Amino acid sequence: MKRVLSLFCLGLFTWACSSNADEEKSEPKVFRTQHYNIIIAPDLSNRVDFSIRQKPLKDLQIAEVVLKNLYPKILNSANRSESQKDRVRFDFINKNLITKYGVETNKLELNFGEFKNQGKRMDYIKGRAERSLQEDREKFMAEYEKIHSTAEKNNFGADIWTYLKGLDNSSIITSGEVNSHNNIEYHHNYKNVMFLLTDGYIEAGLFGQQGCKEGNQCYYLSSNRIKEFRNAFKRSGESDLKQFFEKNGYGIVPVDNPILENVEILALEFNDRSLDHAGNATVYPTDYEILELFWTDWMEKSGVKRFKMKRTLTSEMDAEQEILGFMGVR
């Protein structure tokens, strides 16, 4: 009887060990990779007309900085050497311009996730296939140049508020992919980075109380509104600009769009219209100080994941440092 019990216990123990081993064996290894979903969204209003506002860099040059740094810097960032699914696309703040300008949107996207394996991806990058990264970059920039040239002569207001309200999964990637092979799970997640090319003034046909929700909360931020805010602050006799802003309920109406919690926005290049041609302030507080106050509050209350704004860039090197620094690319 004892021998039977011993054999039974031994068998039970062996089964338990085997069961635990199977459970441990079935637990897959997990590898996580972060890819970039880059959106270039230019404000094609009168700010693109250099006869009105001159600055060291055109939007075209800023976009070119992004494209020329795709390989090797961006694609090989975060210790990635293969399986890159990064995507770069041009997005219209005013979608009606696609038809008005006769845009070929198929030329305004580079998608490294379309390749089945790393070999095909590298053939594309290195120019060893029928299509090449260099050719697609040139097509992208040529189409953008056509858009920019048309906008210089025939521009429209840029309704950035409505644009952010309408962002959806067609441009923002909120869920990743999971691939399994040989008991290994490969998790692919995305970092949505938007380069919003704007001077910071939101002027899209809404002015006065018709463009406001309640009190001092409005959907626009024009030069006149900035001037009114500045004058009200001076009349108040207060010394703390932010405190005055908050106490009197100033701001841009927050955008109610949950997808913004997945978006990191770098806004380039805020143009301070209160400076003279030599770059000296003509009034205090300056337009830039007020723009920074309104925009930062707006982005925070709209739930944007991360936001940074930058004054006028001085060179392509300056643009490269800002762009790669914001993305976390070394």
Image: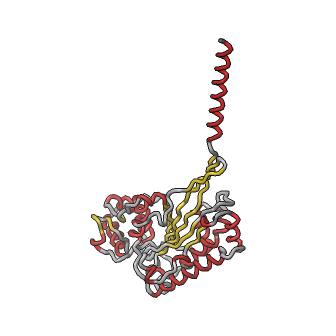
- Residue at figure coordinates x 66%, y 65% from the top left: 73
Left or right of residue 286, residue 105 in this image: right
Q: Is residue 33 above or below residue 61?
A: above
Q: The N terminus is located in which quarter?
A: top right
Q: Is residue 145 above or below residue 299?
A: below
Q: Residue 157, position in %: x, y?
A: 40, 78
Q: Is residue 322 above or below residue 3?
A: below
Residue 24 in view: yes
- Residue at figure coordinates x 51%, y 85% from the top left: 149
Left or right of residue 245, residue 209 in this image: left
Residue 269 in view: no
Q: Residue 320, position in %: x, y?
A: 61, 70
Left or right of residue 330, residue 39 in this image: left
Q: Quadrant of residue 232?
A: bottom left
In this view, the residue in front, 38 or 318, is: 38
- Residue at figure coordinates x 63%, y 62% from the top left: 84
Q: Residue 86, position in %: x, y?
A: 59, 64
Q: Residue 39, position in %: x, y?
A: 52, 68
In this view, the residue in front, 126 or 329, is: 126
Q: The C terminus is located in which quarter?
A: bottom right
Q: Quadrant of residue 223?
A: bottom left
